[in-house]
Amino acid sequence: MRRACARHILVKTKSQAMDLKQQLAKGADFAQLAKRHSQCPSKANGGSLGEFNRGEMAKAFDDAVFKGPLLQIQGPVRTRFGYHLIETIYRS
């Protein structure tokens, strides 16, 4: 697996991330939450990062995408940017 497609929501605090994760577990729309709360420019695309190669993202983020389950919300994953909720769409 060298490429993946994922989307994420980036926030400053773990508590924010946990609150959003609870909302997602109750059926909230990932893209809408990303547009409202994410601090990443990808929020304009509902948190979508498109396709990227292994090793292009921060290590903890990369590990979550390439080692974690598909189509399940992972996180919060902490990087130097903040806390991420990540959904890996596919890997190839």
Image (spheres, rainbow, N blue to C red):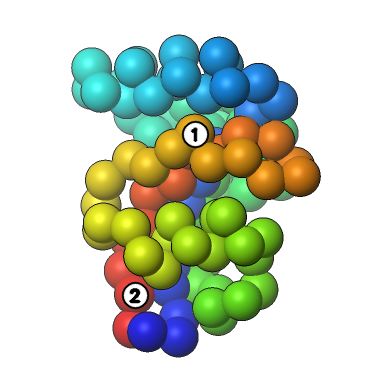
The circle on residue 76 is 1
For the point 31% across and 69% down, the residue is: 90
Q: Could you tell me the amino acid type at mark 2?
A: Arg
Rendered image quadrant of residue 61: bottom right
Write down the residue under mark 2. 91
Q: What is the quadrant of the N terminus in the image?
A: bottom left
For the point 35% across and 16% down, the residue is: 23
Which sits in the foreground, 8 or 32?
Answer: 8
Which sits in the foreground, 59 or 51?
Answer: 59
Which sits in the foreground, 34 or 70?
Answer: 70
Q: Could you tell me the amino acid type at mark 1?
A: Pro
- Residue 44 shows in the view: no
Which sits in the foreground, 85 or 44?
Answer: 85
- Badge 2 marks a residue whose secondary structure is strand
Q: Position of residue 43 (x, y in %)?
A: 61, 40
Q: Position of residue 31 (x, y in %)?
A: 43, 37
State the separation of the CA atoms marked 2 and 1. 20 Å
